[in-house]
Image (tube, rainbow, N blue to C red):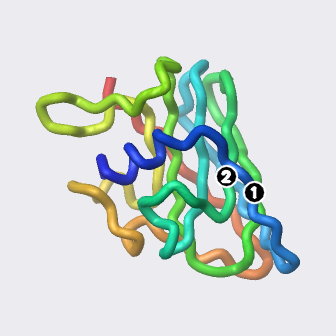
Amino acid sequence: MRRLLIVTASLAGLGTAAAAQAAPVEIDLSGLRAGGRLYVQLQTREQFMGSARAAGQVVNAPAAGSLAVALDVPPGEYAATVWHDDNNNGRFDVDPTNGMPLDGVAMPNLATLRAAPTFDQVKLTVPAEGMKLPMALHYSR
C-alpha cells in the first residue's frame, strides 16, 4: 500500500478525463477529518501506480464527516484511491518503523491489504449507468 500512496501523494493537480460516453462515479467518503487537502482519483490498469489518472479531484480544506466526490469516466475497470493530507504538509506521511500510512487513506478492500496493493485488489468496474462507491477514510494517527 505504501508505494501506491506515495505516488498518489506526489500528485499536484488532478484532472477529469473528457469522454463522450462518460459514466458518473460518485465516491461517498465517510470518516473524514477537517482541514488539509484531499486527493481522490480513478486510474486504469495502465495508469496504476503512476502519476496519470482517468479522473480525479483535489478538495482543499474539507469539512469533517462525509463528502461526495463526483467523477466521470468511460465504463470499465479502475483503481480508486483517496489520500488525505490532513496536516497539509504536502508529504505522504508514513510510520518510519513499519512504512504504514499515517495520513488518511481510502480504497476498496483497504482492510484486507497487508502490503502495497495490486490493481486487482483495489479495482472496481464502472457500468455504463455509473455507480456510487462508499469508502471510509482510515487514519493511523
- Amino acid beneath label 2: Gly
Tag 1: residue type?
Answer: Thr
Residue 99 placement, left or right of 79:
left
Q: Which residue is mark 2?
A: 56
Residue at the outermost left position = 97
Numbered label attached to residue 29: none
| Label 2: how many Cα within 10 Å (few below 14, some 14–19, many 20+) | many
The label number, if any, that marks residue 16 in the structure image: 1
Left or right placement of residue 69 versus residue 134 in this view? right
Q: Which residue lies at the image location 32% right of the left edge and 61% below the top edge?
A: 117
In the figure, 14 relative to 49: above or below? above
Q: Are marks 2 and 1 in contact (CB under 8 Å)?
A: yes
Q: Going 59% across and 38% down the picture, which residue do you hit?
A: 12
Q: Is residue 78 above or below residue 132?
A: below
Residue 123 placement (x, y as % from top left): 48, 70
Residue sitting farthest toward the right:
20
Q: Secondary structure at mark 2?
A: strand
Residue 84: x, y in percent? 51, 33
Q: Earlier in the sequence, mark 2 or mark 1?
A: 1
Where is residue 1 drawn, in percent x and y?
Answer: 31, 52
Residue 67 figure quarter: top right
Place of residue 95 in the rendered image (x, y in percent of width and height, measured from the top left): 22, 29
- For image coordinates 78% across by 72% down, the residue present is 23
Please determine whether, in this image, residue 84 is positioned above or below residue 25: above
Q: CA distance from mark 2 to mark 1?
A: 6 Å
Task: Identify which residue is drawn at 72% across, 56% down.
Answer: 26
Is residue 69 toward the left or the right of residue 10 in the image? right
Pointer 1 local density, CA inside 10 Å: few below 14, some 14–19, many at least 20 = some
Quadrant assignment, res 132:
bottom right
